[in-house]
Image (spheres, rainbow, N blue to C red):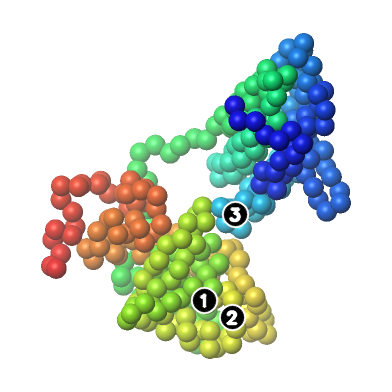
Amino acid sequence: MRRHDPKSHNISGLKGRILNDSEIYLSITEGEKGVKTGLKMSGNSNKTSSEITSFQHLDPGPFVIQAIQNDPTLQPSTKHQYIKAIENYLATGGSLTDPVALAEYALTVGNSTRSFLAAAVTRMAQELEMLAKGSATPDNIDIIQAAVFRTQALQHTIKIRQPQGNRAHSWLTWFEAEQLLDACQRRISGKAEIRIFAQRDRLAIGLMMAAGLRREEAANLQFTDIVKQDERYVLNVTGKGAKSRVVPINKRLAEAIIDWQFLVDAEGLILRSLGRNKEPGESISTTGLYNIVQKRGTMVGKPNLQPHDLRRTYAELGRRAGVPISQISKLLGHASLETTQEYLNIELDLETTISDFVPF
């Protein structure tokens, strides 16, 4: 096992330090205030691993929240959901290191909340495991190993029910997509929409439907992320896990972005909230984007339309136009072709592909 400097080390902004041979603890630094939490164990080599201080007596709430906040691979909206799930659980009086309480609570919430909580607990357990291993010495190795086993067990406490079979996904036809964009030009009453609202909503829908962006990606996209390469405009997109990809866009969408920047006369984030005075804010939330899609979807007879349905529309219209699944997968930022296959509810056939039937 690799040895660490016993004086101190840092992991994701969390500091672990061996005070002496009889105690190991973790501390989270918040300005000048330190919150004790984490692993506290007897370092006496004569003690058995069963004498490790019970996890139920620890208070890792601040620990996991700090770890989530400091994780550069998570989108802001994902961090919010993880922390919200943690805080809601802690509000019940349960401990994050009590597997029985965690499992019982998980049965009382929806699958989405359960998934966020499970992911947050797993992240906490992984951080605790890393810090425990980093604090190992020849004198406390048995105790460290027992602590590691307990943190690993926490990762399997919450069971997530995986959907069986194939689920029918929703997307729009070309005609329906045009209807949705046209709906941005009018109000629910049928009167003409205010120009700035019409342009903002149309652009928001365009970034998700004509560029295949996730809500988080659209909300975080900046004017500096649109670049012209030769005769084609492209978007530099930062997606899940802080992974970057380049998404080529058509001229009409590029012009809509440029026109929007001229209208709002601003730098920074492209999409903005709009107040009652029609003044653009500094940003827009993913909830704000959801509301735009719901509003415009209702206007064209699709009240259950979701932002992700627009991303699926991008993928499906591309597939029907003959774009190879490998290209679609790359443009969507998927980790594998199998993910894209499931996304579109198609069986991957490497012997025969759409591209074989498209003139080129």
- Which mark is first along the chain, 2 or 1? 1
Residue denoted by label 3: 72
Confirm or deny contact between disc 3 and disc 2 (CB under 8 A). no
**Residue 61 coordinates in the image, percent (x, y):** 74, 41
SS label for mark 3: loop
- Which mark is first along the chain, 2 or 3? 3
Left or right: 157 as drawn, with respect to 96? left
**Residue pictured at 43% horizontal, 71% vertical:** 235
Confirm or deny contact between disc 1 and disc 2 (CB under 8 A). yes
Q: Amino acid at mark 1?
A: Thr
Q: Quadrant of the N terminus?
A: top right
Q: Amino acid at mark 2?
A: Glu
Q: Which mark is residue 267?
A: 2
Left or right: 288 as drawn, with respect to 234? right
- Depth check, front residue: 251 or 305: 251
Q: CA distance from mark 3 to mark 2?
A: 23 Å
Q: How many marks?
A: 3
As drawn, 266 above or below 102: below
**Residue pictured at 27% horizontal, 56% vertical:** 325
**Residue pictured at 30% horizontal, 70% vertical:** 174
